[in-house]
Image (cartoon, rainbow, N blue to C red):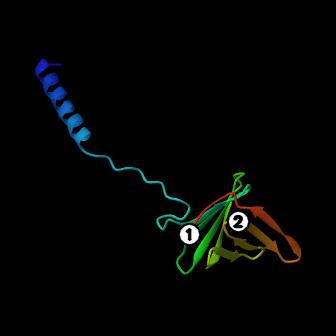
Amino acid sequence: MNWKIALRMTATILSAAALFAAVPLKKATAFSVCGLQGEEAYFKTDSYLITICLGEASYQMIITYHDGTGYQRIPAQREGALFRGSDSQHNYIIDSNTFVIGTDGEPPIRERVIKSQN
C-alpha cells in the first residue's frame, strides 16, 4: 500500500473517531412494568411485588412473584390509599400495611407489606 493512501486513511479514521466522540449518546431508558405511564404506587411483601399502574380506564395491579414464576395483570380501583382488584378466581386488596388475596369460600391469604411507595 502506498504510504500516501495509508496516511489519508489514517486521517479519515481519526476524523470519524473525533466526530463520534463529540456527538453525545442518548441515555438508555429502562421502563417499569407500567411502560411509559410510570408507576402510581408499588408494594413489596415477602412473596410479591405489586405495582400499580395507570391504565386506559382505571388502574392496573401488576402482581409479580418473587420466585420468578411470572406475573398477573389485574384491573384495579383506588379507594383512598387502598387499591382493590379482582380476576375470575381471586379478590386482591392492598394498602401500605397488608396485601390480602381472597378466594370465595376459603380463608384469605394475608401478607405484611415490607416496603411501599405511593
Q: Is residue 7 above or below residue 107?
A: above
Q: Which residue is mark 1?
A: 53
Q: Foreground: 84 or 112?
A: 112
Q: Position of residue 89 (x, y in %)?
A: 78, 74
Amino acid type assigned to the residue bearing label 1 in the image:
Cys
Instruction: Name the secondary structure under disc 2.
Output: loop
* Residue found 58% across the figure and 75% down from its top: 59
- Residue at image location 17% in from the left, 32% down from the top: 12
Give the image location of residue 39, x and y in percent. 53, 65
**Tag 1 secondary structure:** strand
Is the residue marked by circle 1 packed among few (<14), some (14-19), or many (20+) residues within 10 Å? many
C-alpha gap between disc 2 and disc 1: 19 Å
Location of mark 2 (residue) = 97
The quarter of the image holding the C terminus is bottom right
Decide which of 26, 10 is in the foreground and name it.
Answer: 26
Picture disc at residue 87: none
Residue 96 image-quadrant placement:
bottom right
Which of these two is toward me, 71 or 108? 108
Q: Quarter of the image holding residue 109?
A: bottom right
Q: Position of residue 19 (x, y in %)?
A: 21, 40
Tell me where residue 26 appears, x and y as whole percent: 34, 50
**Who comes first in sequence, dot 2 or dot 1?**
1
